[in-house]
Image (tube, rainbow, N blue to C red):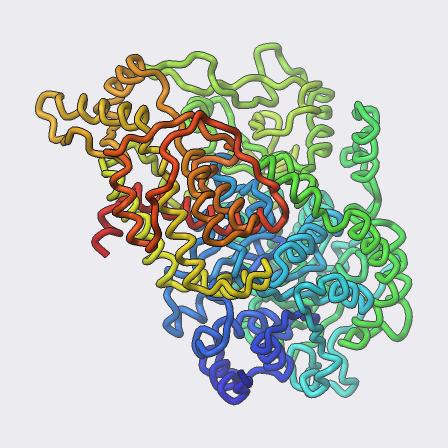
Amino acid sequence: MSFDKKAFREFNKKLTSFYPYAYQTKVAELFTEGKNVILSVPTGAGKTWASIMPFLFAKEQSNFSFPSKLIYSLPLRALTNSIYLDVKEVLKNNGYPDDEIERQTGEFSNDKNFEKELIFSTIDQTLSNFCSFPLAISQRQANVNAGSLIGSYLIFDEFHLLDASLSMSTTLGILKSLKNLSRYCIMTATLSDDFIKFLKKNLPESNFEIVTLKDFPEDAKIIKSLLPPSDRADKNKKQVHVENKPLDAKLIVEKHQNRTIVICNRVETAQNIVIEIEKELEQQNNKTKVLCIHSRFFDKHRKEKEVILKDQLGKTKRNENVDLILIATQVIEAGMDISCEVMHTEISPANSFLQRIGRCARFEEEFGDIFVYDPKELNKLEKIDEELAQTKSQKKEIQRLNRLYLPYERTICEETKKALTESEFQFINEDASEKLVNRVMRELELNEVEIMKTAQFNKSTIRESWQACSKSYYGKLVRDIQSINLVLIDETKENQVLRNPFLFDSLGMFRWSFIKWVNEIYKNNVVDEDEWVIKKIEESQILDFSDEGDESKYQLEKVSKEAVKSHYDLTFINAKYFHYNDKIGLNLQLGKELSPYRIFTEKETFDTVYKKDTFLQHNYGLLGAFEKEFLKKKHLDYAFIQFGTFLNRPDLKREDWIRLIRLMIIFHDYGKLNNPWQKWMQSLQKAKAEQPNSNWIYIKDEPLGHTDFDKERDDYIEKAIYKKFGKRPPHSGIGALAIRELLEDWLDNEVIINATSLAIARHHGVSNLSCPEFIISDNNFKVMYELAKVVGMDFSEITKEEDGEDLEFEETPNEYILYFFLVRILRMCDQMATADFEKYIKN
């Protein structure tokens, strides 16, 4: 279809109160034409709405093919939360369904299965879902979420912040695997021209176009965040001052006007500079408010600080009297919609530096001064003793942590500083930013390119992860885990920890920095034998099956000074030795606060009550859930269109894919018709119905899907049946074997046959590849004739008896992709129908 530019402009104006920039309109036009986009525009130029608006416009127009689900991924939790709240407010005010916009960050975990239409997620959550080790759900459910990316619109914002060898390479590997099945937008503000060209060249399967402001000079002249105040004769917006010394509290206070931001490379530096600034202000009897934010604050305090800084440094207060100095680390480096007149920053690589100064003079009619400092030499307390290392890799990590320019490389920082001393970078505008990145970052980024090419975009590791479904792949594909989660308690909180180890908030810290602290504590304190510095939680070895008594299933155990080097899990630290202050966070000197209670964003529910349904009722429930939750919401339609090209089967249309999914649903529990399975379940239902005052019903020889079950009432009945018949036989492999015959006659396509069969085999877990011995009586099989009418097929030749065998699959990448698509639908429908089959049969 032809792109209706006028309609798009008016639609954009209606939602945001502004007409779109020319580059934003071009982005929407490219998506209409079937292209994907690599968008490289400076901070504050509206790239968030440039990426989201085509999705919203497509839903409004509904006359061109585009996904109906959007997954917006960012590298930082704070950034994800900020953009989610900003976008949700605008959409909510324009009538967009409030319950279809959600965030999934680990901290906020209200959409663990990625079911909503607009999902704002951390890159960790998105990648772990597709790689089959979802962080938010159990390993048994690891194959549920990968399919959520298939047929969706995927936005990857602040792409330059991703680790080249891990999350960045994995993201590109995923896009190369998905090919045309989804739509994509990669957004960055600070990648070199060469790197952006590399992205396009290496994603040919996905049909990318590059959009930058170079092609839209008219936008550069009107984007207010890029323009200097109208009353400035020199027409410059941001001026750089290079200071050949470390951060200076006295100079920071001296240069402060209304809003000042100080960005440090290390938490320790931020904590120290807060103390120094407050002393300087106190000496001057100055009432300026000081706010500090970094990674060593509990969530409760960090959220409170984010609200303050967004209020005081956000756009709504830019013309009001504000008196605030913010000291932060890289946590505010990207995406935060805040601004200051004066910024003080330690030197960092050019791309990081440009992100930082995006928080200075960000809004219209603002001018900013940026002071650049050398990093401060580490003091004795901050340096980690290399003798603590037990292996070469540990020693290497300690050496990295002791670097003056941590977390960056010295060379790239020094090159950035050298460039900033030159006259052409005295004032930073769009041209200067582009030149700085291309000059300083080119060699580093070319090295990163080679790393990704050599690793082949982690595609083989992604495939290993699909097979293993293990969170151990997090460190191989997403993020190098070098932090440890700490909970600060004293003896008064230990009993609560034993009842629920996850009751209290935790915070993260580099492992070796923490180990250094532990050694300092033991060196400077006499720790009695009956005291503890660190403890870990372990499940008790005493299993209590009675519901009596207060025995805990957890126990707290001491962790020795030596053992902490190999400890990675949740760690409890003693408030006698560790300290916390809501001004500077976790430290070894100031404060007496403990970990606050976690902020639970959802109710913890445990399904211990099930309602009896027949085999037919259960299947009709799944078919109804598929109709109501998937087909009516049209979340699958884009994938239905694209799978024909993906699998080289253009003859398969939407109705064929719907028929395939209905067939898969009908056969997913075919194994429950197995005589031993039905005997087990019907005996259980009969035993329940025979209980005194029972309202449970048993009908002889009625093929069941589930029995009634209430853990509080009838756990002992199930144990009696178990004792009589043994373990209930497995069933999922039976349907996986049986459906192959039908699919071979109908489709004659190994990829589709294997993927569908695999989805059935693994609809209760992630590893089954076998079919047990089974025999299905004619009485049990009769229900299949009823279900055959749903798909208009003849089931009379379906096998009813087998000795059992292993199921064989090639497990090619394309098979995995289709399998993920199908198994997600099957497992989600199964969960919905099991919870309330009547809801879906009635509707």
Name the foreground residue: 326 vs 473: 473
Residue 5 relative to residue 168: left or right: left
Relative horizontal placement of residue 536, taking residue 708 as reference (left or right) = right
| Vertical arrangement, residue 673 with respect to residue 190, above or below | above
Depth check: give the residue in front, 105 or 752. 752
Q: In the displayed image of the protein, which residue is found farthest to the top?
A: 529
Q: Is residue 558 left or right of residue 713?
A: right
Q: Position of residue 107 (x, y in %)?
A: 50, 46
All told, the count of numbered labels is 0
Percent position of residue 12, x then y: 50, 80
Q: At 38% from the left edge and 43% from the top edge, which residue is drawn? A: 667
Q: Quadrant of residue 102?
A: bottom left
Residue plotted at (55% across, 57% down): 80
- Could you tell me if residue 101 is visible in this image? no
What x and y, as percent, mark residue 148?
50, 53
220, 462: nearer the viewer = 462
In this view, 732 is above or below 47: above
**Image quarter of the C terminus:** bottom left
Residue 437 position in % (x across, y down)? 82, 66
Left or right, 788 with reference to 451:
left
Judging depth in this view, the residue of 465 and 274 nearest the camera is 465
Question: In the image, what residue occupies the spot 35% across and 28% down?
Answer: 775
Q: Height in image: 206 above or below 427?
A: above
Res 183 visible? yes
Residue most extreme to the front:
797
The residue furthest left is: 693
